[in-house]
Image: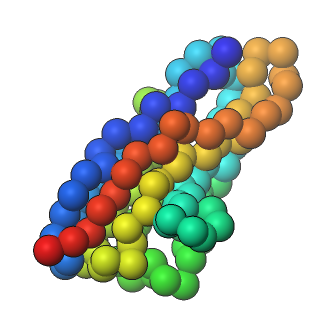
Amino acid sequence: QVQLVESGGGLVQPGGSLRLSCAASGSIFAIHAMGWYRQAPGKQRELVAAITSGGSTNYADSVKGRFTISRDNTKNTVYLQMNSLKPEDTAVYYCNADISDYGLVDLDYWGQGTQVTVSS
């Protein structure tokens, strides 16, 4: 069994910063791509940023230059540093990871979501 546990969401003023963390635990053989998605009320879930096991990254155009995704493979953890936050960044943020277990079964896992609210 594999779990993703997120932390770091909250309320922040426009222009502020937050750092999200997502730790994977359980029967993990290998973690491949990891990423962050978000879903605002009434909107579809969208990719915010992703990072491969080798460290290559890609970002949604709306967050380029403001958000940075990183990972610590020794801790099975992915981070999302969010700077210059805007009200339109308000959403529930979900961690996602492509993980192989010890049976070499490759599955897609999701965290429970963490609320980020940007408001004055």
Locate residue 105 relative to residue 39 in the image: left or right. Answer: right
User: Could you tell me which residue is drawn at 50 percent across and 66 percent down?
Assistant: 40
Locate residue 17 relative to residue 30 in the image: left or right. Answer: left
What colour scheme has been applied to the protein in the rendered image? rainbow
Quarter of the image where one finds residue 39 = bottom right
Foreground pick, 40 / 49: 40
User: Could you tell me which residue is drawn at 63 percent across and 22 percent down?
Assistant: 2
Number of labelled discs? 0
Residue 33 locus on image (x, y percent): 67, 49
Q: Can residue 77 be seen by looking at this rendering?
A: no
Locate residue 22 relative to residue 16 in the image: left or right. Answer: right
What quarter of the picture does the C terminus occupy? bottom left
User: Could you tell me which residue is drawn at 67 percent across and 36 percent down?
Assistant: 109
Foreground pick, 74 / 63: 63
Residue 90 locus on image (x, y percent): 37, 67
> Eyeballing the image, is 53 above or below 38?
above
> Eyeballing the image, is 109 above or below 44?
above
Residue 22 locus on image (x, y percent): 44, 39
Quarter of the image where one finds residue 89 = bottom left
Locate residue 68 relative to residue 44 in the image: left or right. Answer: left
User: Could you tell me which residue is drawn at 54 percent across and 84 percent down?
Assistant: 61
Residue placed farthest to the front in the image?
42
